[in-house]
Image: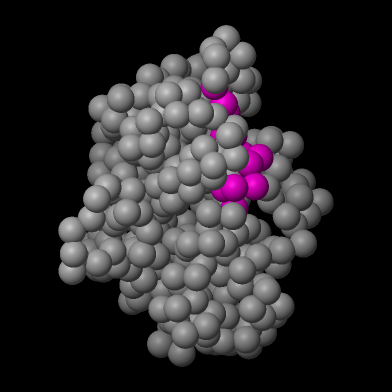
Amino acid sequence: MTTHAEPLSSVLETVGETPLVRVHDSPDEVPVYAKLETFNPGASIKDRIGKYMLERMLERGDVGEGGTVIEPTAGNTGIGIAVAAGQLGLNAIFVVPERFSVEKQQLMRALGAEVVNTPSKEGMELAIERAHEIAEELDDAVVPQQFSNPLNAEAHYETTAPEIDEALDGEVGAVVAGCGTAGTLMGMARYFREADADTHVTAVEPAGSAYREFFGEDVDHEEYKTEGIGTHDIDTNELFEPALVDEVQAIDDREVHEEMGRLAAEEGQLVASSAAANSLAAKRVARDIRDGEIDAPHDAVVTIFCDSSERYLSKGVYRSFEEWEG
């Protein structure tokens, strides 16, 4: 974790170095470890790309101090970018489909950002289009575009993966992570595949999402309640590299809802739906390694707990499945 031994000059210095904690419901022979990204100052994994992308873009001259960053986002990326923008002298505007978490949108505004909503039924595609339209209307404005910017995956190659590698002394057998932009999984997959080409890599998506189409599967596009991962149009997910992925697991919303409750009640983990999906997939991978169905170089599986359930309480994540609003 971030050191408490000396005072820090900025909240940006607290991004990263998050704890890696055992998931107790995983097999003893092949433990699952989860990176607890709620320990970041903006309380999600997206703080990493907010800080990393904006620092690199300022260094390259993509935007100048006092300029504006405009991003289409479901929320956490907006919070992460807003935290970084405020400390780096940048303005921030976020384009968010209406259906996404009210808590996230309130936090973006609290951090000084402007939020522009688009109709939920149009998905992220319209949000991306609107972000670029706004950028064209302003001077010194840039769209980092987390869905296509290589800096997204690079942030996890440079920070998330090395932290895991150090904590487990390089003995990582499998990497499991949900894919929204796919930046988290791609950065970690590239890092661990370079260390050992036999590292098993599993992408996670909600049932009804389309990532399996990258592998030629037919997918029934359906709405899902699991938030922050998945896609209905793989053409917008430019970072995903099928060659780095062994399998895609699609996780049903009902299983996710049950696992969110179990993680809270049994393990003290107040994490949201994407973390629950990651937990379920990672435990399946761990059991398959234990049972000899997956040949992995080491007996440890790593995954990501991306953010906190507190951001979704208004959606009833801990009420009945029927009351949980997607």
Asked if the stretch drawn in magenta spans residue 16, the answer is: no
Give me the residue at 49% from left, 32% from top: 73
Occupied quadrant, residue 134: top right
How many discs mark residues in the rendered view? 0
Q: Nearer the viewer, residue 129 or 56?
A: 56
- Does 291 sit above or below residue 313? below
299 displayed left or right of 1: right
70 displayed left or right of 128: left
Q: Nearer the viewer, residue 76 or 313?
A: 76
Point out residue 72 in the picture as x, y percentages from the top left corner: 53, 28
Asked if the stretch drawn in magenta spans residue 143, the answer is: yes
Point out residue 120 in the picture as x, y percentages from the top left corner: 50, 22
Q: Nearer the viewer, residue 250 or 160?
A: 160
Point out residue 221 in the picture as x, y percentages from the top left corner: 65, 37
Q: Quadrant of the C terminus?
A: top left
- Does 164 sit above or below residue 294? above
Occupied quadrant, residue 186: bottom right
Q: Nearer the viewer, residue 24 or 127?
A: 127
Give me the residue at 42% from left, 37% from top: 81
Is there any visible trace of residue 244 in the rendered image? yes
Point out residue 301 in the picture as x, y percentages from the top left corner: 50, 76
Is there any visible trace of residue 227 in the rendered image? no
Check the image and tell me how it is coloured: one colour
What range is drawn magenta here?
141-153
